[in-house]
């Protein structure tokens, strides 16, 4: 049996911070294999977001660590994320959606006081219409947010909580403690 890997203290503390989070009930986190060629040390979490029992979004958060530091990262730790959610066609076609999606990320980092630098990424909106054997639901779309940033400090709990806030926003969850009211039918409709 191989001896356990000895991780650098910085990386071990950062991973402990990510593991210590308890997200809201609609977000299920799971440790998954991390890419091994991006940095000497890596750790990854996947997330599935549920609303009313249905999966409405997914994401992945990867922690990279290079003890020697990385010039482009402006540090030795880097967080990389990918978040995606299905959207109604009208929302997916909105030309303001990419800017709104980016604001979900920056606002979440600010709200959790997840101090960082070197933030960059993309927001992609796509539309899909099914035909032939795949015909089915009406046209729909999705949003994908890909981003990375360098956390300031080794406490990554605020960064994970910001990521969970981003997941909730992207998937259209109401704020914590708010319950969506059932829609009422207008008078005279069946």
Image (cartoon, rainbow, N blue to C red):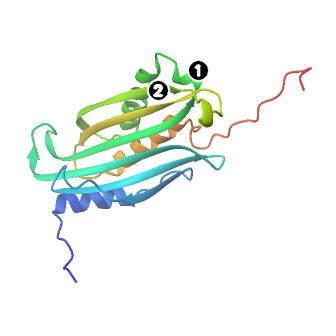
Decide if residue 20 is in sight here.
no
Q: In what element is the residue under mark 2? A: strand
Left or right, residue 42 beside residue 102: left
Q: How many marks?
A: 2
Question: Residue 178, located in which quarter of the rendered image?
Answer: top right
Which residue carries the number 1 mark? 90
Residue 47 versus residue 139 in the image, above or below: below
Residue 122 versus residue 5 in the image, above or below: above
Q: Nearer the viewer, mark 1 or mark 2?
A: 2
Q: In what element is the residue under mark 1? A: helix
Q: Quadrant of the C terminus?
A: top right
Which of these two is toward me, 103 or 46?
46
Question: Which residue is rendered at x = 56% and y = 38% of the image?
Answer: 175
Residue extending furthest bottom?
A: 1
Residue 125 horizontal/vertical position (percent):
45, 26
Question: Residue 67, located in which quarter of the rendered image?
Answer: bottom left
Residue 184 horizontal/vertical position (percent):
81, 29
Residue 165 horizontal/vertical position (percent):
46, 41
Residue 80 versus residue 143 in the image, above or below: below
Q: Residues within 10 Å of mark 1 (few under 14, many from 20)?
A: few
Query: Quick one: label 1 or label 2, which is nearer the N terminus?
Result: 1
Which residue carries the number 2 mark? 126
């Amino acid at each position: 049996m191989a001896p356990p890997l000895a991780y650098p203290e910085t990386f071990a503390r950062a991973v402990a911070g990510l593991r210590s989070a308890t997200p809201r009930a609609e977000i299920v986190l799971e440790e998954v294999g991390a890419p091994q060629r991006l940095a000497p040390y890596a750790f990854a979490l996947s997330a599935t977001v549920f609303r009313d029992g249905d999966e409405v979004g997914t994401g992945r958060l990867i922690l990279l660590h290079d003890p020697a530091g990385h010039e482009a990262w402006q540090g030795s730790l880097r967080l990389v994320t990918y978040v995606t959610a299905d959207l109604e066609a009208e929302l997916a076609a909105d030309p303001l959606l990419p800017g709104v999606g980016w604001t979900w990320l920056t606002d979440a980092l600010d709200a959790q006081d997840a101090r960082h630098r070197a933030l960059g990424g993309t927001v992609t909106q796509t539309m899909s219409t099914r035909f032939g054997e795949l015909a089915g639901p009406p046209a729909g779309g999705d949003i994908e947010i890909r981003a990375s940033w360098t956390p300031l400090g080794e406490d990554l709990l605020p960064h994970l909580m910001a990521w969970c806030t981003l997941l909730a926003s992207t998937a259209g969850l109401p704020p914590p403690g708010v319950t969506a009211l059932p829609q009422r039918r207008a008078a005279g409709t069946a």
